[in-house]
Image: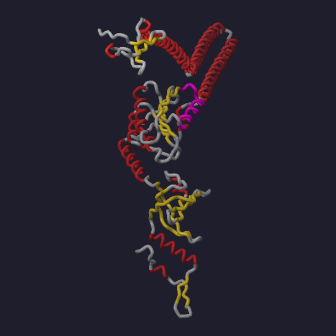
Amino acid sequence: MNPLQLPDEFWLEDTVLDDDSGESRHVYSVSQLSGDIRLILEDNFTPVWVEGEISTLRTPASGHSYFTLKDERSQLKAVIFRRQRVALKYQLQEGDRVLCNGRISLYEPRGEYQIIVSSIELQGLGELWRAFTDLKEKLMREGLFKPERKKAIPQLPQTLALITSATGAAVHDILQVVRRRFVGVEIIVVPVTVQGEQAAGEIVAALELVNRYWRERIDTVILARGGGSYEDLQPFNDERVARAIAAGSIPLISAVGHEIDFTIADFVADLRAPTPSAAAELVIADQSEIVDRLHHLRQRLQQIGRYQISVERRRLQMLALALERGGETVSLRRQEFVELKIRFRTAMLSRLRLVRQNLKIYEFRLQQESPLLRIKPLLAGIDLQEQRFKQALRHLLAGKRQQVTVSSDRLKSGSPLAVLARGYTIVERVDNDKVVSKSSDLAVGEQLRLRLHQGGAMCRVEKIDEL
């Protein structure tokens, strides 16, 4: 049926009036007419795809988004309800050109027809989403997302590799969290491009570098970037990046985008963090929490020691009372008392030694995490490099001075002034200042100029000798 052709049911007679000519007229109320038009639109334009540019976008407190789709000649009212809007990967923005899928309906209170949108795609985004879905299903069938293949993240890594942009916000957020929670962790930043055509290749190269050469040194890897558009996150949906993550032997945390953004890298990684800052908080324990835990353990040990002392003291008191009452067995009880006292003293000394040993172990571990232990070797290395640099610079300057001296001597020995100083003379014609090198070029009576080492002279040719 043609969408503009009205069905027969539309012409039901609600009210029949006769005009002056005797002909009957079908009269509708505004609400009845609007309702019938809405039914016609919904029956004939469902579903429908509409392409246009978003304008007059607004999202009130209800969470529904209202906007207008327009092109060069027309415009169409549109609404997407909160539930569908929250499920979108794409965030609505004024001025974007989009493809909307939905059903055409009529908003009866105002008599305006509109499209009730169920899904929205940026122009060109459909192919990217299909590629994302196909790759996700492929890797899932291969088992790259299985929980049993994921590696455990260390609670307190000593060295952390951060693969991200050196100028992005992600690296600053992670460094700030690490400094705040535990200053003893070493961080190695591996800078890469996180968007664009070259980004996927650089990320793969960085992952191979870390797992091949720093495998024994690094405990955890964080692959991070801040949020962005769906196109900006495409390097993290690249199959090469996914397989490089899966092939790595070091536990890896994926911290790509914001909380609503998921990439292929998130599914393959050993752990997914919603933001770069959250990744740092997941992998780095708070130093104050560790100190509190040590204090708690120390208090527990002290409580256990005090309890054991109390138990043994009561036993000694009971033995002492028994000794006082048992006159005939005084000497025997006294011996038992002495033995118990010795056993008690030995046990307490042993327990106290164990407590002190545990405390020393915890203090040693804290000292090992001190940044000073790592800074001192670095400072010593810097001093050694500085001495080597100064020595190499002195050798270089001495060699350059010798080269300058030799070049100066060679320049002086080849200088025309040095030749003139040995008694030679330059003969020039007066008329054109050309140098004369052969006697056959001279003529009797010709004026010549003689250039000496100091000064010069004018002369005339009287006789020509040919050798």
Residue 105 on image: x %, y %: 51, 68
Q: Quadrant of the C terminus?
A: top left
Q: Residue at x 42, y 43 (%)?
A: 237
Range drawn in magenta: 168-185
Q: Is residue 427 above or below residue 262?
A: above
Q: Is residue 162 above or below residue 49?
A: above
Q: Is residue 416 above or below residue 63?
A: above
Q: Would residue 177 be counted in the magenta stretch? A: yes
Residue 455 on image: x %, y %: 48, 11
Toward the viewer: 167 or 10?
167
Residue 422 on image: x %, y %: 42, 5
Q: Would residue 457 be counted in the magenta stretch? A: no
Q: Residue at x 42, y 53 (%)?
A: 126
Q: Main secondary structure of the magenta part?
A: helix
Residue 368 on image: x %, y %: 55, 20
Residue 64 seen = no
Toward the viewer: 430 or 182?
430
